[in-house]
Image (cartoon, coloured by chain):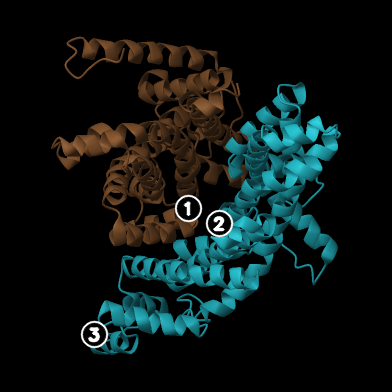
Amino acid sequence: MARYIVHRALAAIPVLLLTSIIVFLLMRMLPGDPVLMIISQAQTDVSAEIAERMRQEYGLTQPLYMQYFAWLSRLLSGDLGRSIISRQPAFDILLTRILPTAQISLTAWLLAMLISVPVGITTAASQGSWKDWLGTIGSLLGAAMPYFLTGGVLIYFVALRWRWLPASGYVSPFVDPVRSAATTILPALTLTLWLASTVTRQTRASFIDVLQQAYIRTARAKGLSETRVILWHALKNAMLPVVTVLGIQLGSLFSGAVITETIFAVPGVGRLMVDGILSRDYPMVQAVVLFLTLVVVLANLLVDVAYGVLDPRSRTT
Amino acid sequence: MYPSAIDPNLPRAIKQPLRARFERAMRHFARHRLAMVGLTLVLVQILTAALAPLLAPYAPNAIDYRAMLNGPTAAHLLGTDDLGRDILSRLIYGARVSMGVSVASVFVAIAAGVPFGLITGYIGGALDEALMRVLDSVMALPALVLALTIATVLGHGVFNGMIAIAVVLIPIFTRIVRGQVLSVKHNDYVQAAHSVGVPTYLVLLRHILPNAINPVIVQGSLAIGFAIIIESSLSFIGLGAEPPTPTWGSMVQIGFQYLETAPWFVLAPATMIFLAVLGFNMLGDGLRDLLDPVSRSRH
């Protein structure tokens, strides 16, 4: 198993390198000269000679591939550049923003898993019944709900009309755990609805496929109860595609934070990216994009490891 | 008896089952209730976008300072926005941009992704492997984050938004078509076409591409729903069409500032986004059931 994990981790390295090239090239294509942008933010008059010297210092006069390797070596030592706006290291700013995003995304992910797996199993096990229809229609509607609508409805009713929870902001659990939970619930529920719907659909489809297999018929023919058939024989096999969706969507949740953190004014990674785009703070945008890519690649790696645990056959491939 | 290669009735013999298959498929589709609801939603929205000047009660940018943030009334069925503009009219015109950009981006993604998948899958080898690793890397970037980054690089605007969404979607179609090419390129009928001297581009177009059409149609419908979400997100962030052009996402963005006093300002465009995505998702699900015999047997 350890060899399998190392193998999968090594396979993720080329993907990370290629994505770093894509992000680097995208950032180099951004409109405007980075040096002129730094000068304009500093609001001082700088001669063309000094600007040229700055370009040389930043390595911008070197060939593109040299710039990439220089950038990559800085990246590997944790240097993501400096924010043009605050002049603070981008890495330090990013670190302070990870906790809110991780807290909200992981809460949403856990809630979605707790809702979607039992609902998916129930609907698949009672195909054609009113439970199946309710679950199918509910997940269809939920999967089409944009974060704007879920978030808008939750803020309007739960926060503004009923005053049960705060409409915006974030409090760290290390400062005030109760208020932290209160500020997490609405953005997490906004993310949960969509994810739970998507995973419910996958769970249902996967269980229907597994329940048609010959070994399930055999288990039923032996006289086992339906609960035992589902929990002992179907669950492990049906969970493979569900694990894939849950793993892949963990990355999507982090990128969904771009919208929910804007709606709920949460000072997380997503909000950092939006602020970076609006203020043209490109080193900050680059740092966030790299971080989110790393999260997605790690989530995919976790899916591979989970696959290895659930299905030993996959370890040989 | 099987028709021989010199059977003069061959074209007719092929057409008959094709027509019968098409009619049977249409009957299945008409019986698929969710698909029909999806199709209705999609058609209503497309007609709304197409007939916007006839349907909208006001010009989308007509300002009435005496009616700012008014609730729904007989004069303004969905109320007015912060500048006194009629929300219903802006929603109707907004459908043109939001739906137009989304549908166009999917067509661009199909136009680029399908030939790409056909060629890489057919050529195979190291080139195919290398290109697939690049696509894997593009797909490792979260879709919305990639679209936001590309839109930032390209700048504001309807056209740039459409390109940003299309770039995100291209790998999806390339992968689907490549997968289909790999599964059929060694089949006997493809080898037979080669052996009688049919040029490669004709083999690709006539014998391999038809196998990939069904999954592309299904994915195309689902991708439009996804594109609507990304387009509205870009507009919401401020990277979509320039004001005062109405888009659903930009209406939501401004509306959130007035959520407590004028909830309809957010809920109306957000509901339109929901209905559009729902329509295309249901249509896509229906098409998948229709075009995938294994799935159809379950209904």
- Amino acid type at image mark 1: Ala
Looking at the image, which residue is at 73% across and 32% down?
A217
Residue B156 at x, y = what percent?
36, 52
Vertical relation: B163 (above or below) A80: above
Question: Which badge, 3 or 2, comes first in the chain's sequence?
Answer: 3
- Whether marks 1 and 3 lie on the same chain: no
Chain of the residue where label 1 is placed in the rendered structure:
B
Q: Which mark is residue B143?
A: 1
- Please tell me how crowded label 1 is: few (under 14), some (14-19), or many (20+) other residues with Cα within 10 Å: many
Left/right of residue A8 with respect to residue B46 in the rendered view:
right
Q: Which mark is residue A255?
A: 2
Q: Does the image show residue A110? A: yes
Q: State the residue position of label 3.
A: A48
Chain of the residue where label 3 is placed in the rendered structure:
A
Q: Which chain is cyan?
A: A
Residue A102 at x, y = what percent?
67, 63
Mark 1 lies on a secondary structure that is helix
Label 1 close to label 2 by CB (< 8 Å)? yes
Q: Does the image show residue A265? A: no
Q: Residue furthest front?
A: B1
| Nearer to the camera, A7 or B79 | A7
Label 3 close to label 2 by CB (< 8 Å)? no
Mark 2 lies on a secondary structure that is helix
Quadrant the N terminus of chain A occupies: bottom right
The image quarter in which residue A200 lies = top right
The image quarter in which residue B130 lies = bottom left
* Hue used for the chain lettered B: brown
Looking at the image, which residue is at 75% across and 68% down?
A172
